[in-house]
Amino acid sequence: MDTQRPLILITNDDGYAAKGLRKLITLMRTLGEVAVISTDEVMSAKSHSCTIHDRLYARLVHEELGFKEFRCNGTPVDGVKLAYQKLLPRWPDLVVSGINHGTNAASTVVYSGTIAAVVESCMNGLNAIGFSLDSMDPDADFDHLDTVILEITKKVLKEGLPKGVCLNVNFPKRCEEPLRGIQLCRQASCRWVEYFKDQYDENGELFYDLSGELVSDDIKPGTDLYAMRHNYVAVVPTMFDWTAHVCLETMKDYESIRINL
């Protein structure tokens, strides 16, 4: 691969044939050398899981000048670990994940394999961006996103990101009106109202099918959910540090608990 052009690693959690992945590949190839490590199957909601006890494979499925594509039987996090540690000639200048079919806004980010791949990259000092569209349609329309994805990516390639920070970028699905712009947001609070539906397999054994609905009372100005509802691109600077820093002083009295009784 050409060492003069940036090396961009692309991953996803929707499988190698996902339309969003194919769109992202097309866009990134205009900006640099591209390597792809996709999941064999849909790995949605795998979060930051990685393969320890099973065999992990990565197969080169296509190669041409400035482009390599691998498929991995593991999770998105497995893929990026393998890519920059074993499969690439050098560590990438940027990791991009997506374009995910379905939102990763608000607290749903906790479950996301798409964003877990981004966070994994960030933990290792790499600039990384996750892109998601608020549509689960396998044939979703991504064409209204070309310019904004390219501009955000070029800005990160040129300027980098603060240490320990990656980007979670969520797009509203296409509507009659053009996108109104970009809003830098905080992650809204939400929860899933879930239920398990009883199902029976071919042997008559009961199993459970999880479904649910995203509910939030935090759709306020400044949040990603508010931005998307008003047809803005929501950009959330995201960190892997889960420390509740606001509590370090207010909970100081924990240090007074006696442990040598």
Image (cartoon, helix red, strand yellow):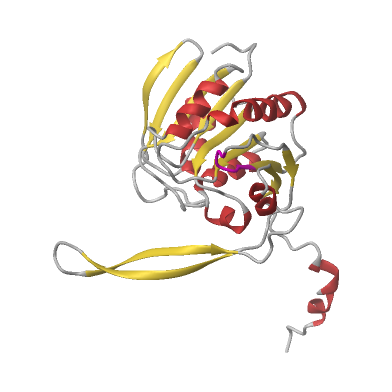
- Which residue is outermost to the right? 249
Q: Position of residue 173 (x, y in %)?
A: 55, 42
Residue 62 visible? The answer is: yes
Report the magenta residues as a range. Answer: 169-175
Write down the quadrant of residue 248 in the picture.
bottom right
Tell me the quarter of the image containing the C terminus: bottom right
Residue under the point 45% across and 20% down: 68
Residue under the point 66% across and 62% down: 189
Q: Position of residue 72 (x, y in %)?
A: 39, 36
- Which residue is outermost to the bottom? 261
Q: Position of residue 179 (x, y in %)?
A: 66, 36
Q: Is residue 132 above or below residue 70?
A: below
Q: Which one is nearer the viewer's eye here, 87 or 215?
A: 215
Residue under the point 50% across and 43% down: 77
Q: Which one is nearer the viewer's eye here, 130 or 116?
A: 130
Whether residue 230 is in magenta: the answer is: no
Residue 89 visible? The answer is: no
Question: Left of 202 or right of it: where is 191?
Answer: right
Whether residue 174 is in magenta: the answer is: yes
